[in-house]
Amino acid sequence: MKKTRIGLLVAALLCASATSAWAQKKGAATKGAEAGGDQAAGDQAAGDQAAGDQAAGDQAAGDQAAGDDQAAGAPAGGDELPAGLPEGGGLGDICKIDPEACPKLDMDKEAAKPLDEQIYAMQQLFVLRRNRLELNPYWSFSLNDQFVQHNAPGIGVNYYISNVLAIGANFNWYINSDSAFNAELRRSGRVSVPLTEYQWGAALNFSYVPAIGKFAGFGDFIFHYDAYVVGGVGALSTRPIPVIDPDNRNFAFEPKIAFNAGIGLRIFLNRWFAATLEVRDYIFNDKLENLSVPATVREQQDDSNWYGDSKLTNNVQAQLGVSLFLPFSFEYRLPK
């Protein structure tokens, strides 16, 4: 009986220990599996992070390489720059935009060339006048005679012995206009004003060009101009208009010495054609009609009694015309 109890006790103990061992092994396995899973997940996460870091590093390295290539001026698409082309911006940008326009230069040879370039501070003159002939047809009209208009077609000829100095001559043929209404008004009002009419005028002149310039007009067209002064001496044929005693007096034209001075402006449309504007004063000593009438008819018909005092007269006239320079073309002595 006692042995039976001992045997049952041993058996119970064995069953209990087996049950405990089996339960402990199952829990340990579960804990081990969980620990292994966590470790595997951690290892996978660490692997993923390492792969991400490696990918980011590769991307950073690629960006750095692309940046280095771009900074070096390398053309897009991996094309290389031509030999001798400096690296970094500048001409490299041209090669990227238009490869056909990329310059093919040997920069070493270009850098070795001596620097002997000439820099011109002044541009060449638009028109050269030296050794050229100027023909200047014009129309003139008087400015300072309120009773008689002395309009005249004329022509001037100038030869330039230098680019600014010329010697020339001009000729005027006057067309006087004293209307019949003025004549009747003078006689009815008994207004005795000595009048003079002109026939022709000729002068030998010297011209000097002190200023040249240019201006823009009609959009982007550039006009070149020059300003000149002129002076000379010649003759002017004049005669008094019979106003005091028109029934008996009949004057003849007589030439008088006349000095002239003026200023002018030429606006060039090309290298040989220009429009001109000039104001010139012809100064001469004119003979005027005698303001008194002799008592006898014989004295009235004596032409020695027709003339009165002489007076220094200014015939200020404006001239509008054109200038033609011959020959039409010219050559510069020095390179531009």
Image (tube, rainbow, N blue to C red):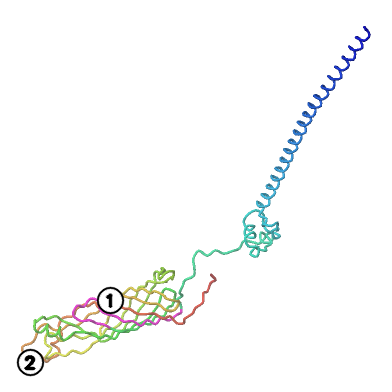
What is the chief secondary structure element of the magenta stretch? strand
For residue 205, what is the image quadrant? bottom left
Instruction: Give the structural element (helix, strand or loop) at label 1.
Output: strand
Q: Residue 264's x, y, as percent?
A: 34, 74
**Three-letter code for the amino acid on which mark 1 is drawn:** Asp
Give the label on residue 297, or none: 2
For the residue pair 126 and 217, the one nearer the viewer reads as: 217
Q: Along the horizontal axis of the image, is 235 left or right of 180?
A: right
Alpha carbon distance from label 2 to label 1: 40 Å
Residue furthest front as drawn? 1
Question: Which residue is at a point 92% across and 12% down the rendered structure image?
Answer: 7
Position of 122 compared to 98: left or right? left
Local crowd size for mark 2, using a 10 Å CA cut-off: few (<14), some (14–19), many (≥20) = few
Q: Which mark is residue 281?
A: 1
Mark 2: which secondary structure?
helix
Say if mark 2 contacts mark 1, CB within 8 Å: no
Which of discs 2 and 1 lies nearer the camera? The answer is 1
Q: Is residue 93 magenta?
A: no
Magenta-highlighted residues: 131-151
